[in-house]
Image (cartoon, rainbow, N blue to C red):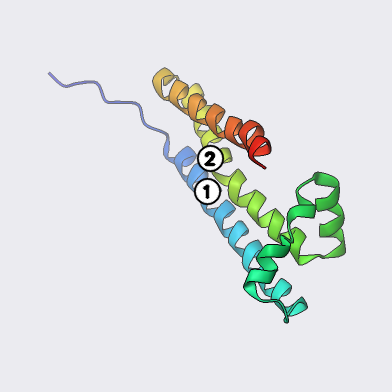
C-alpha cells in the first residue's frame, strides 16, 4: 500500500517565489554597492569609522526624508533604500509562501508561515522602533 504523496508547491509558483528572492537580493546588492561607491567618491576624506559614526542613513529612515533624498540623488538615501529592499525581500518571500500554501489548502504550512510572517512583522514594526 502506497502512502499519499505530500502536497508540494507547483513548479511555476516555486520558480516565481525563487525569482522574487533572487531579484530582491540582487536589487539590494546593486543599490548598496552603487550607493557605497558614490558615497566614497563624494566623501573621499572620510575614514570608515567617521562614516559609520556619522550614520548617514539616519535622516532617511522616514518616508518623506527618503523620498526627498532619492529625488536629490543622495547616496545615503540609496543606501537606506538598499537596506529596506534587503529587509523586505524575505518578508515578501514568506508572505508569498503563505499565499500559495493557503491556496493549496496546506493548513499546517499555512499556519507555520503565518506565524513566521507575524513574528517578522512584529520584530520589524514593534520591537525595531522600541530598540531604535
Where 29 sits versus 42, above or below?
Answer: above
Above or below residue 88? Residue 8 is above
Residue sitting at x 83%, y 58%: 69
Screen quadrant of the C terminus: top right
Residue 107 at x, y percent in the picture: 43, 18
- Left or right, 8 with respect to 99, comes to left
Tell me residue 91's x, y (percent): 57, 39
| Above or below 36: residue 115 | above
Residue position marked by numbered label 1 in the rendering: 21
Disc 2 crowd rating (10 Å Cα; few below 14, some 14-19, many 20+) is some
Quadrant in which the N terminus appears: top left
Name the residue carrying label 2. 93
Residue 112: x and y in percent read 44, 25
The residue sitting at 50% across, 42% down in the picture is 17
Q: Secondary structure at mark 1?
A: helix
Answer whether labels 2 and 1 touch (C-beta < 8 Å). Answer: yes
CA distance for labels 2 and 1: 6 Å
Identify which residue, 130 or 91, lies in the foreground.
130
Can the viewer see residue 29?
yes
Pick the front one: 127 or 26: 127
**Residue at image coords 68%, 63%:** 53
Amino acid at each position: 500500500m502506497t502512502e499519499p504523496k505530500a502536497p508540494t508547491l507547483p513548479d511555476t509558483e516555486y520558480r516565481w517565489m525563487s525569482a522574487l528572492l533572487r531579484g530582491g537580493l540582487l536589487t539590494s546588492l546593486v543599490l548598496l554597492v552603487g550607493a557605497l561607491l558614490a558615497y566614497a567618491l563624494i566623501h573621499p576624506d572620510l575614514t570608515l569609522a567617521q562614516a559609520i559614526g556619522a550614520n548617514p542613513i539616519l535622516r532617511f529612515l522616514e518616508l518623506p526624508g527618503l523620498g526627498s533624498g532619492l529625488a536629490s540623488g543622495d547616496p545615503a538615501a540609496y543606501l537606506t533604500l538598499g537596506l529596506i529592499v534587503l529587509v523586505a525581500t524575505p518578508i515578501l518571500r514568506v508572505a508569498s509562501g503563505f499565499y500559495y500554501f493557503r491556496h493549496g489548502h496546506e493548513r499546517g504550512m499555512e499556519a507555520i508561515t503565518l506565524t513566521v510572517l507575524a513574528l517578522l512583522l512584529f520584530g520589524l514594526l514593534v520591537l525595531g522602533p522600541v530598540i531604535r
